[in-house]
Image (cartoon, rainbow, N blue to C red):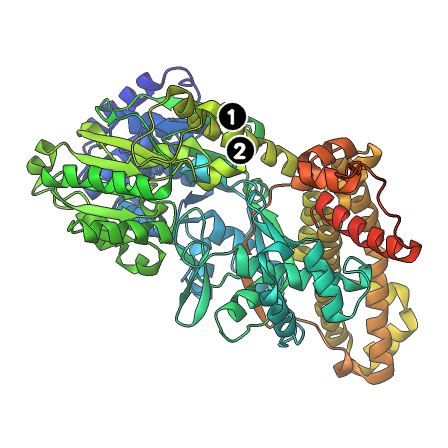
């Protein structure tokens, strides 16, 4: 925080403006003075003039104050449309003057590139070198970008580079420069630091180019299963076998028990096949583009290149669509976003919706929320939420609302849940004769043009959440030539068509309307059959006699509307719990990752020299050194050490993943799964040094027996990067009775434990002992599979 002005932000802004207005020399001269004096007022005054001359814009007082807050470890709340992009430049230049590097991390590639290009003239006047990294940036350009004073990118891209650098074998192949003297300023901070905090970034390597020979047959079997053979869980987005499916699998593959340890590989392949067939949905979770499966980023709505589903799931989805099966990667590195952000020396954030997340900012990152009054008060009209019985009636109501607005030439932006919903709505608008544009992952290359025209009078834009955050829609078009007509029609009308898991997501869509004092309005349309209503059991919240019958009309019952709104609050609370559980669950793994990554990096850069061969096998080492040369042998040892560190870390990740799948069983004995997980991971980590020593010893023996060229260095042939949804469900402490009450339906409970009450009142006929034993085995197996969510 800037000294002497901590509690006097308006005085600071006034001092900055006074300094800038009184300056008669060039911006460069003022920037040079700022670098010399490191005076905050001078630094901010230099930015003020650079923005004014380079961009033709006069910064608001609110932008200076927001920039002041961003200099400290704060989350600045600045209303949508108030110019957070310019506010970040103030704080960034101050850090550059102090000799630091700045990463400005935003919501997606489009915004990162847009903000860098937009601000570049101001940075050029300040003689600050800037760069941008997007998903399509090449390796050499990435290297150069990380050496710039200010880098614009996304958390995902920088995080993936961090993981990929762990896998290189030469310092010249690493793209990053580490985190020394580097700070991060995060745009849309509530989304990136909170909503996405629990999501791990994954780097998986293809170690051998081999196809999985078993999966096609197993997938074909999974396709034969009927609805009663498997079940799906919407909350965890997973599919699993039930008793009849287990029996069919055992008969088909000739095994006794699908849950025996030796059948784990088969069970995993079956479950991934079921997930591909019955959980993942085309145009919602992924698209098929250019003959390839491309994952849709759940938060940006974009098709993410070079990402794949984990395990056998990617191959199963490809089989589902008759595509060629790609190689299966093994996870070689992972880090949740919240832990990646902790790599920076300092973090600050900015968003239009920070106050509602103040507790989470403080708990997760130690950031203090600072509200900044807008330069121009908002005049947006937020209409009441409209509730409908089902998706069909909801979308019909949306079309009717759009038609009314369209007839008076009011521009409309509709935010949809996913590609499938955007296309359904588009078809309905076509049927109603309403001309419109559609923006989703299938045509994201058209984004700039579609957004440019979204504020035109009469424009109707249907979008996934690609346009939900950080997107500027100017009334009357990009040049604002038709601004008066758009204003007279009521300004932009932002319509949401789904209840998000966080109110902030819906609020960000609302924020697209009525920016900087413009007129505008918003309304949210929801239906009772949305996934979030099912996950959080809306029907149990509404009294049975109050739950509405099917209707095409808007549901106005106050009890129903109130409970629908409460669903979002429940979701937000559960999401916070998930983040806290994940922190408890992954704390020890992150400690181990920091140690392993740091150690490997020192070996990579020559800051540490492995001397294990000299210490463990001095005679073999000296013989090899005499034969091949000490430098050649030491270079080989370093390369082999890097590979073995990767190998032991892969094993650690595999162990921790397996442990997470089974650790919840410890709750039955009253233990805390989180504590047990941490204890066992610590024990495994302690044994890793022994494993590494054994692997290294085998290397020098191989050289001694077969020559230096015989020692092969296992390296990934290709690296995948992708995201996983990680909720930490394994941390739920569940007693056996709680598990039974939560997992088993009334019918299940009666089936396993109910008394026989046959109509005749006679005792049930005793089965033959052998048949009874077999039947009991089958039933108990299915019971425990369901109880433990296998």
Above or below 471: residue 368: above
Above or below 8: residue 26: below
- Residue 718 sits in quarter: bottom right
Q: How crowded is mark 1: few (under 14 residues within 10 Å), some or many (20 or more)?
A: some
Which residue corresponds to the image point at 31% horizontal and 28% vertical from the top-left?
79
Above or below 442: residue 200: above
Q: In this view, does 24 lie to the left or right of 262?
A: left
Q: Which of 199 and 406 is in front in this view?
A: 406
Q: How crowded is mark 2: few (under 14 residues within 10 Å), some or many (20 or more)?
A: few
Q: Is residue 195 left or right of residue 228?
A: left
Which label is found at residue 537?
A: 2
Picture coordinates of residue 262 (x, y %)?
81, 64
Give the SS element for disc 1. Answer: helix
Which residue corresponds to the image point at 50% horizontal and 23% vertical from the top-left?
543
- Residue 191 sits in quarter: top left
Q: Which of 242 and 163 is in front in this view?
A: 242
Picture coordinates of residue 667 (x, y %)?
78, 36
The residue under label 1 is 541
């Amino acid at each position: 925080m800037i000294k002497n002005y901590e509690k006097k932000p308006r005085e600071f802004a006034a001092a900055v403006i006074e300094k800038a207005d009184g300056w008669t020399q060039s911006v460069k001269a003022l920037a040079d003075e700022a670098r010399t004096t490191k005076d905050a007022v001078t630094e901010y005054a230099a930015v003020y003039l650079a923005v004014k001359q380079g961009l033709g814009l006069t910064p608001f007082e609110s932008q200076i104050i927001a920039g002041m807050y961003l200099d400290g470890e704060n989350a600045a709340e600045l209303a949508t449309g108030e110019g957070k992009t310019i506010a970040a430049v103030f704080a960034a230049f101050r850090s550059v003057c102090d000799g630091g590097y700045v990463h400005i991390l935003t919501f997606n590639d489009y915004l990162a590139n847009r903000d860098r290009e937009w601000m570049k003239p101001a940075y050029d006047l300040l003689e600050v070198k800037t760069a941008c990294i997007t998903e399509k940036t090449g390796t050499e350009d990435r290297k150069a970008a990380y050496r710039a004073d200010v880098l614009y990118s996304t958390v995902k891209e920088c995080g993936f580079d961090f993981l990929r650098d762990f896998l290189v074998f030469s310092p010249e192949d690493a793209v990053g420069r580490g985190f020394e003297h580097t700070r991060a300023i995060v745009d849309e901070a509530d989304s990136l630091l909170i909503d996405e905090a629990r999501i791990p970034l994954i780097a998986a390597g293809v170690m051998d180019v081999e196809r999985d020979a078993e999966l096609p047959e197993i997938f074909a079997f999974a396709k034969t299963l009927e609805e009663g053979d498997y079940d799906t869980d919407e909350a965890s987005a997973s599919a699993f076998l039930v008793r009849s499916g287990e029996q069919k699998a055992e008969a088909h593959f000739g095994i006794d028990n699908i849950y025996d340890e030796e059948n784990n590989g088969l069970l995993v392949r079956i479950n991934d096949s079921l997930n591909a067939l019955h959980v993942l949905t085309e145009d919602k979770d992924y698209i098929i583009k250019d003959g390839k499966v491309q994952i849709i980023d759940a938060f940006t709505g974009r098709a993410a290149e070079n990402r794949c589903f984990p395990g056998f799931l990617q191959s199963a989805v490809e089989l589902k669509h008759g595509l060629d099966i790609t190689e299966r990667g093994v996870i070689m590195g992972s880090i949740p976003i919240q832990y990646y952000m902790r790599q920076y020396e300092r973090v600050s954030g900015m968003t239009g919706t920070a106050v509602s997340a103040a507790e989470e900012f403080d708990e997760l990152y130690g950031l203090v929320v600072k509200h900044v009054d807008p330069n121009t008060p908002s005049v947006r009209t937020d209409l009441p939420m409209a509730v409908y019985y089902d998706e069909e009636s909801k979308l019909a109501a949306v079309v009717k609302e759009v038609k009314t607005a369209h007839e008076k030439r009011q521009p409309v932006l509709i935010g949809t849940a996913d590609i499938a919903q955007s296309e359904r709505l588009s078809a309905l608008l076509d049927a109603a004769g309403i001309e419109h544009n559609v923006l989703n992952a299938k045509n994201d290359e058209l984004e700039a043009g579609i957004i440019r025209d979204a504020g035109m009078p009469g424009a109707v834009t249907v979008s996934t959440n690609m346009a939900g955050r950080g997107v500027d829609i100017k009334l009357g078009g990009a040049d604002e030539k038709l601004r008066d007509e758009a204003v007279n029609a009521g300004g932009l009308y932002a319509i949401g068509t789904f209840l998000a898991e966080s109110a902030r997501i819906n609020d960000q869509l609302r924020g697209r309307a009525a920016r900087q004092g413009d007129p505008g309005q918003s309304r949210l349309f929801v239906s009772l059959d949305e996934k979030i209503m099912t996950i959080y059991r809306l029907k149990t919240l509404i009294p049975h006699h109050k739950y509405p019958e099917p209707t095409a009309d808007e549901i106005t019952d106050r009890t129903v509307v109130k409970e629908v709104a409460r669903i979002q609050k429940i979701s937000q609370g559960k999401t916070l719990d998930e983040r806290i559980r994940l922190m408890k669950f992954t704390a020890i793994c992150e400690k181990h990752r920091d140690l392993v990554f740091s150690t490997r990096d020192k070996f990579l850069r020559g800051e540490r020299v492995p001397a294990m061969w000299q210490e463990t096998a001095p005679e073999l080492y000296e013989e090899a050194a005499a034969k091949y040369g000490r430098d050649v042998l030491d270079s080989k040892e370093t390369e082999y050490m890097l590979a073995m560190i990767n190998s032991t870390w892969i094993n650690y990740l595999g162990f921790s993943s397996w442990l997470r799948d089974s650790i919840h069983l410890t709750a039955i004995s009253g233990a805390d799964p989180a504590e047990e997980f941490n204890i066992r991971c610590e024990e495994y980590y302690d044994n890793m040094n022994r494993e590494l020593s054994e692997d290294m010893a085998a290397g020098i023996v191989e050289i001694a027996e077969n020559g230096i060229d015989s020692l092969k260095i296992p390296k990934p042939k290709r690296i995948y990067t992708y995201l996983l949804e990680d909720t930490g469900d394994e941390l739920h402490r569940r007693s056996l009775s709680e598990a039974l009450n939560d997992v088993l339906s009334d019918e299940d409970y009666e089936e396993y434990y109910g008394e026989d009450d046959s109509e005749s009142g006679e005792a049930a006929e005793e089965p033959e002992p052998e048949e009874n034993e077999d039947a009991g085995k089958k039933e108990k197996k299915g019971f425990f599979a369901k109880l433990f969510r296998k």
